[in-house]
Image: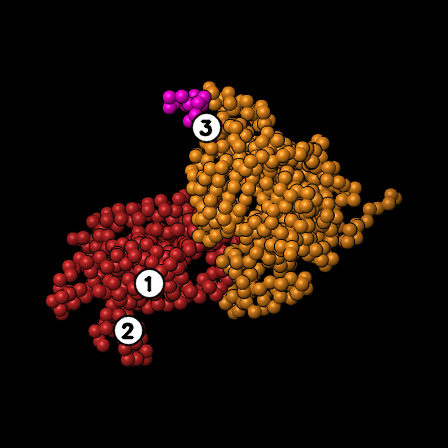
Chain colours: A orange, B red
Amino acid sequence: MSASLSPLPALSHPALEAVEITKRFSGVVANDAVSFSLEPGEIHVLLGENGAGKSTLMNILYGLQKPDQGEIWVGGKAVRLDGPKDAIQQGVVMVHQHFMLVPVFTVLENIVLGVEQTRGQWGQLGVLERAKPARQIQALADQLSLQVDLNAKVGELPVGVQQKVEIIKALYRGARILILDEPTAVLTPTEATELFELLRRLTQQGLSIVLITHKLKECLAIADRISVMRQGKMVGTVYPQQASESLLAEMMVGRKVILQVEKPLMQAGAPVLQTRRLVVWDDRHQPAVNGVDLTVCAGEILGIAGVQGNGQTELSEALTGLRSPAQGQIDILGQDQTGASPRQLIEQGLAHVPEDRGKNGIVKTYSLADNAVLCTYYQPPFAKKGLIRPGAIARQATQLIQEFDIRPANPRVLAGSLSGGNQQKLIMARELSRGAKLLIACQPTRGVDIGAIELIHRRIIAARNQGMGVLLISSELDEILALSDRIAVMYQGKVLETLAIAEATRERLGCLMAGMVQS
Amino acid sequence: MEEITGFLKLALITATPIALGAYAGILSERAGVVNIAIEGMMLTGALVAQLTAMYLYAPLQAAGIPAAEIASLCLGVIAGILAGALLGGLHSITSIRFKADQIISGTVINLLAWGMTGWIYQRWMTATAPTAPGTFPRIPIPGLRQIPVLGDLLFNHQPIVYTMLLLTGVIHYVLFYTPWGLHVRSVGEHPRAADTVGINVERVRYISTIVGGAIAGLAGVWLTLEQVGSFTLRMSAGRGFIALAAMIFGRWTPLGAFGTSLLFGLGTALQIRAASLASASAGLAMIPTQLYQAIPYLLTIIVLAGFGGKATPPAASGQPYEK
C-alpha cells in the first residue's frame, strides 16, 4: 500500500488563496491565471504598475468582481464571494485607497454602518444602539493604542486618522485578513511609519495583511514576502532579503530599469518665475496658499514637496492663470503677470503639465493630433487665414509621437484611449515643443508606468539643461529628491523652508512635511 | 386672540401639502435621487383620490354600507397614495435602473401628470360625473381638544393634517435614529462606501423614492379630499415646487422643512385673509390682492436665493450609482 496522503493540519493552510484566477474585461485579460497565497500572520506586498491587474485581483478577493475562472480559498476552504458582504463574513476586509467613509457621519456611525445593533424588535427601524458599540470600539482602539474621538465628524479629521478609522472599522467587522490598497499614497513619511508599526502589531495579533503598492522602498521595508504582477500575470514571489529596488523594478517592467537620472551641475540663470506674498483662496474661500514667496531661475528645478492638500493645487492653478490670486504678485520672465489669462501666459512662454491630466491636460474625445496642438492650434503653421491646417497638425503630431515614443503611434486615435503613461508623454511633448521658458509640472508621473517615468524624468532634466526654469510639484518624495536642485516644502499653504539639494535629507523633509520646523 | 389662533390654524392647514411634499423630497434626496416631480405626483394623487372616491361613493351607498361617505373617502386616500407611489416607482426606474438624468425624468413625469390629469378630468369628471362624497370631517381629539388655545390650533383638524404632524416626527426618527436612516443617508452621501459594507444601494434608493412618491400622493389627496372636495385643472398650483424650496431651506431635515412650510403657510393664510384685511383698514386696501397671492412664490424665490446661509445637499444627490 502506498503512503496515503493525510490531510495537512489546519494551521498550515494559507489564510487566503487565489487559485488560477482569470478575469477578462471586454476582451482585455486583466488577470491571466493568477495564483496568490497569503500565509497566516504575514504581510504580503502585492507590487505592480498601474494596470498590472493588482486591483482586479483584490476586487475579486473582496467579492466586488466575479472571476471568469479560478477559485478562492479562505482558511483551507473554497468559498464563493457574491459581494463584499460574503467576503466580510469570511473575515476578509478591504481598506480602499480612497477611503470608504461618509464625511458627514461621526466616527462611530461610520464604523457601525452596515452592522448596526438595535434596541427592540423593529429590525432596521429600531433605535440605533450607540453606547454598546462605542465601548467595543474603544476597547479595540485601546488594544492597539490608537486614539480616536468616536463622536468627531470623519470629514474633519486628518487623513492619517481617517485611515485608522478605516482599520478599526475593518477590525470591528471581525476582519482576520486585511487588504490595504495603496495605503501610504496620502500619508506623510511619519504617518506612513506609524501605519507600518500598527500593521506589525496587527500581525502579532494573528491578522494577515495584503498590501498593494507601487512604491519600491516601502515594499522592502514592510513586507514578509513580495509578489509582483505585470500585464495581468503573476511574475513571481520573492523575500525582501533577496530583493533590491532594481530587481523589483525589473520584475515590474520586464527589463532593466535605470532608477537614477543623470543630472549634470548647472549654473542657475536669471529668475523666470517670482511670487511675492502670494495668497490664493480655495473653493470655499479659505486661504489655501497663504503668503508664498518663490523664485525659480532659468536652468534650475525647484521642487515643491508636501503632502497632498497643503495648497499645491491652488498654487499651481494661480501660477498658470486658472485661478485668480487673492493677494500678492506673480512675475514671469521679469514681468508682472498677476491675473493674466492662461493664453497670455502660454504666449509669454509658460508650459504646464497639470495635476489632473484627464480633466485639464488633454481633451479625451479629441484625437492625439488635435491634443498635440491644443495651445498653438490658432498660430501658423497650424492655422492660416483663420482656417485649421490638418496636414501641418498631423506632421507635428507624427514628429512628437516619434520623439516621445507615444504609443500607439497613430495621430488619429482618441487621446482618451491612450494609457495614462502615454497620455502624460503626449502632454509633455506638447508642452516642451513650443520653446517655453518656464515649466510648471504638477505630479508629472502620478499613475504612470515606470517606462514613462524614466522618459518624463529624462525630459525634464533635459529641458532644465537647455535653460528652462522648472517648478516641480510632487507628493512623491523620491521624485523630488531625484530631480530638484532646490526643494521648498509646503505645509498648510506656506513654504516652511527652502533647502538646497545637498542639505535635503529624507528625514529633514519628512519633518517639514509634517509641519515641524527645526529651531 | 381668536383672530390670531384662527390665522395660525389656517397657516398650519395650508402648510400641510407643502410639508408633505417636502418630506417626499427629503426621503428621495437623502437617498441620492433628486425628485422635482413632486408637483406631478401631487396632482396625480389629487385626481386619482377624487376619481376613486367619486365613483365608489354611489355603489357603496347602494350596497348599504354604513358611513359610505367616509369609506369612499378612505379608499380615495389609498388610491391617491398608490398613484403617487406608482409615479415614484417610475421615477426610480428611470433614474436608478436606467441612470437617466433625474431632472429630465422629473420634468417628464410632471408633463405626464399635467397632460394625463387634464385628459381624465375632461373625459370622466365633468358634466356626467357622479356625486362626490365631499371632504373629510374634522376629528377633534377627545381630551386634548379641550386645552385652551392649543386645543383648537392643534387637535381639531382633518386627518391628513394629523398625519403630516405625525410624519414629521416619524421621518425625523427614522432618518436620524435608526439603522435604516443611517443606510439612507450613507447611500445619499457616499454610495460606494455603503456598497462596500454590504448595503444594497439600489434597493435603498428604490424604497426611499417610492415611499417619497406615496407621501407626495398624500399631499395631493389633501387638495381634493380634505380642502376642496372636487378636482380642478392644475390645482396643485406649484405647491410641489414650493415644497422643494421648503426642503432646501429646511436643510433636508423634516423639522426644518416643517418650520419652513409653516412660513409658507403663513404667507398663504395672509393671501386668503387679504380681503378681510383690506376691509379692515383703508391703508391695507391700497395693496392689490395680486400681491398677496404672489406671497408664497415670492417667499420661494427669497428662500432659494440663499437667504439664511448656504445649504449643502446630500453629496451624491442626483448622481446615478455606477458600480
Name which quarter of the figure residue A235 lies in: top right
| Residues packed near mark 1 inside 10 Å, few (<14), some (14 to 19) or many (20 plus) | many
Disc 3 residue type (three-letter): Thr
Residue at screen point 60% across, 38% down? A301
Task: Please check the rendered image and state whether residue A375 is part of the magenta-colored stretch, yes or no.
Answer: yes
Using residue A334 as the reference point, say whether residue A240 is left or right of it: right
Residue at the right extreme of this rendering: A1
> Could you give the CA–CA distance between mark 3 and mark 1, rounded to whole angstroms?
54 Å
Q: How far apart, in angstroms, are the residues tagged by discs 1 and 2?
A: 18 Å
For residue A501, which quarter of the picture? top right
Callout 2: 10 Å neighbours few (<14), some, many (20+)?
some
The answer to whether residue B301 is magenta is no
Q: Mark yes or no: residue A101 visible.
A: yes
Where is residue A317 shown, x and y percent of the image?
48, 42
Amino acid on which the number 1 mark rests in the picture: Thr
Q: Considering the numbered disc 2 on the image, is that residue within a helix, a strand or a loop? A: helix
Task: Please tell me whether the stretch drawn in magenta is mainly helix, strand or loop.
Answer: loop
> Along the horizontal axis of the image, is A191 left or right of A116?
right
Q: Are marks 3 and 1 on the same chain?
A: no
| Numbered circle sitting on residue B260 | 1
| Residue A39 drawn at (x, y percent) | 74, 49
3 vs 1, front mark: 3
**Which stretch did the figure color magenta?**
A373-389
